[in-house]
Amino acid sequence: LDHCGSLPHMSEVVGYDGPIYMTYPTKAIAPVLLEDYRKVQTEFKGDKNFFTSQMIKNCMKKVIAINIHEKIDVDNELSIRAFYAGHVLGAAMFQIMVGSESVLYTGDFNTTPDRHLGAARVEPGLKPDLLISESTYATTIRDSKRARERDFLKKVHDTVSNGGKVLIPVFALGRAQELCILLESYWERMNLKYPIFFSQGLAEKANQYYRLFISWTNEKIKRTFVERNMFDFKHIRPFEQSYIESPGPMVLFSTPGIYLY
């Protein structure tokens, strides 16, 4: 959302009338994220000066969907090309070319494949004149991913084994799917029966788009897709409000919007 949240404001309020390019998954998911954002800001936070649902629809009608590696001539001098960023479904880096000079611009990207997406990649030998890169965690040194996952699984398992409930705050797109696959695999391996839920609405819709755009996922998921879609979870199901008072252990993946209910 932090990459597209102001788009309806730019196109429908500020008056930007240039082209808007998105990959196909982003074009599918963006209006869902934007509508959820609008609902939170207006219905729960009371913001009266905010873009409307109709503005989101009008904005999305102006979007031109493009494929990875597809070269788009914006005008007689400027062209662009998208590359796979491996951050969330639909995430892309953009090469902008004018004559013999080029810029590679990227927001969040991931050079290491994870459980549901492949690694970021550009055309071999690509040498832009300028690289503009997101760098939030550029200087952060973390423990190994395997160690962090092992610690996470132990804490979750210990909590539910002792009758407790685990609330896991996640964004609906990206981290939610990664952790769902992690817990799904662990539950399967350990033959656990404790219920796992994810909040209905945004997370559920995001999972549907991951099923739809399976070609954007990593090689392992694509290879096993014929036998089983990894996003058809056996142990994880949508959460209903009536479950709040349910006794006993459970795990809940919750997107930010659910805290407002």
Image (cartoon, grey):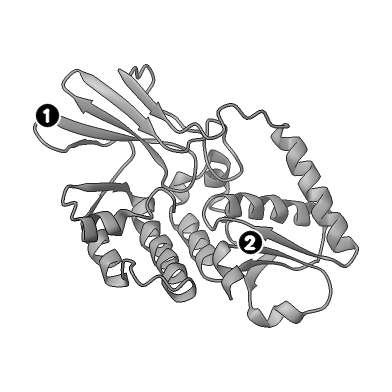
On screen, residue 74 versus residue 10, left or right, reads: left
Sort mark 2 into few (<14), some (14-19) or many (20+) by Cα contacts within 10 Å: some
The kind of residue on which mark 2 rests is Phe
* N-term mark: 2 or 1: 1
Sort mark 1 into few (<14), some (14-19) or many (20+) by Cα contacts within 10 Å: few
Local secondary structure at mark 2: loop
Residue linked to disc 1 = 77
The residue sitting at 64% across, 69% down in the picture is: 237
Q: Specify the farthest residue to the left.
A: 76
Q: Is residue 234 something that shows in the picture?
A: no
Q: Where 112 falls versus 212 (above or below)?
A: above
The residue sitting at 53% across, 35% down in the picture is: 136
The residue sitting at 53% across, 30% down in the picture is: 111
How many numbered markers are drawn? 2
Q: Is residue 3 something that shows in the picture?
A: yes
Q: Specify the farthest residue to the bottom.
A: 242
- Residue 118: x and y in percent read 52, 37
Q: Quadrant of the N terminus?
A: bottom left
Residues at marks 2 and 1, CA–CA distance in whole angstroms:
48 Å
Front residue of 211 and 26 = 26
- Residue 144: x and y in percent read 72, 32
The kind of residue on which mark 1 rests is Glu
Front residue of 239 and 68 = 239
Q: Quadrant of the C terminus?
A: bottom right
Residue linked to disc 2 = 233
In this rendering, which labeled residue sits more in front, label 2 or label 1?
1
Q: Where 115 falls versus 161 (above or below)?
A: above
- Kindly indicate whether the residue at mark 1 contacts the one at mark 2 (C-beta within 8 angstroms): no
Local secondary structure at mark 1: loop
Front residue of 9 and 116 = 9
Residue 171: assigned label: none
Q: Specify the farthest residue to the right.
A: 162
